[in-house]
Amino acid sequence: MLIDRSTPQRPWLLTWENVEGLIAIGAFRHPFPVGRQATLQYDGTYLSLEIELLQQEPSQDVKLLPEAIRFEHGTEPRNIRVSCLDTQLNRHFYMYVCETLELIREGNKNPTDALRIAWDRFGEFIQQQSILSHEKQVGLLGELTFLTTLASIPEIGWANALEAWHQNALAEHDFSLPRSDFEVKTTTKEKREHVIGSLDQLRENPERPLSLVSYHLTHAPNNANGSLCLAELVTQIQHTLVAQPLLSDKFVSRLGKSGWRAPHNVLYAAHYVPRSAPTIITVDGKFPRLTRGALVHLPEEARARITSVVYGVDVTELGEPLTRSTILGMEQ
């Protein structure tokens, strides 16, 4: 259970009712007296906390829940900001903010350490409240479809397929076999267009070929032949692994790191059918991608101010059909 830190013993904190009232009025900025600039902000869409970093303090990223909580650099070069992207989580997010501020003010922690410690305490609870967005549901459906494809290959099987699936939500690539990596992308757009979330997402590791696996789906009636459904696929895999408890536990653990929660599975009942056959595309010098090398000609100060890059790429007619042979071919 989250504890409301905004008690009479801490009058410098707003109560949640205060914050809720401010949100109802509109955009606002509220500073907190924690020995540095620390401001709770609402821009009409997202609730955020922006904190000043003192000169000697580290500014490395704080890895949080990718689905609901976003960490980024703030409006000033030495500021950091954490934002809640799911309005249904605002109250829980504010409790996390209060814990962070208290660690800074009372515990003399620097902001990045305070954010990490507070996340260790509250992160799991916030994750449990978060329902996957449509994009995340479709993305996970693609990953599970590829997982079952790997498991169906005799040379790989379920044990190796599960081991290949990302160890955590922040893994560099979605799947890593012994000699090659795979990034799985799924789209429901008319064209085979995928969103790439960073300059590093399509960066291959030395001596390890990287492939993009592309699934191209469209919405379908629940009774459509050959349709794919996230809730049904999760249940199907769990049924397949029921006689192998170690693998079943590993599957549920990996699933949880993707943001899936068992009580929410009934909400993921949308059905899809392939708009076109899945493909596999080698990510090499000919692949249309952005990397950090694309920024090399910018002045160093300008590069330092580019904190995130998200772009779309159309891979229509690229690559070849996704088959057992094309997958195993990457391992040779």
Image (cartoon, grey):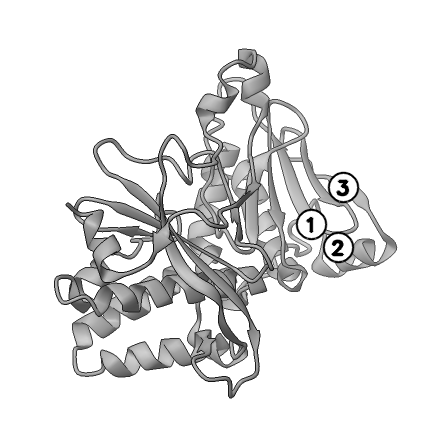
Q: Which mark is residue 95?
A: none
Mark earlier in primary sequence (3, 2): 2
Task: Check disc 2 and report its element: helix, strand or loop.
Answer: helix
Look at label 2 and name its amino acid: Val
Closer to the eye: label 1 or 3: 1
The reply to whether discs 2 and 1 touch (Cβ–Cβ < 8 Å) is: yes
Using residue 261 as the reference point, say whether residue 33 is left or right of it.
right
> What residue lies at 53% left-to-right and 85% top-to-bottom?
222
The 10 Å Cα crowd at callout 2, few under 14, some 14 to 19, many 20 or more, is some
Could you give the CA–CA distance between mark 1 and mark 3, rounded to whole angstroms?
11 Å
Based on the displayed image, in which of its 4 quarters is residue 148 positioned?
bottom left
Residue 19 is tagged as: 2
Q: In the picture, which quadrant includes the C terminus?
A: top left
Crowding at dot 3, Cα within 10 Å, few <14 / some 14-19 / many 20+, comes out as few
Q: Which mark is residue 47?
A: 1
The residue under the point 75% across, 55% down is 19
Is residue 240 visible to the viewer in this orientation of the structure? yes
Q: Is residue 33 left or right of residue 173?
A: right
Q: Is residue 53 above or below residue 250?
A: above
Query: What's the amino acid at mark 1?
Result: Leu
- Relative to 159, residue 173 above or below: above
Q: Tag on residue 30? A: 3
The percent position of residue 91, horizontal first and vertical second, equals 65, 61
Foreground of the two, 197 or 64 = 197
User: Visible in this render: residue 1?
Assistant: no
Q: Is residue 232 above or below residue 313?
A: below
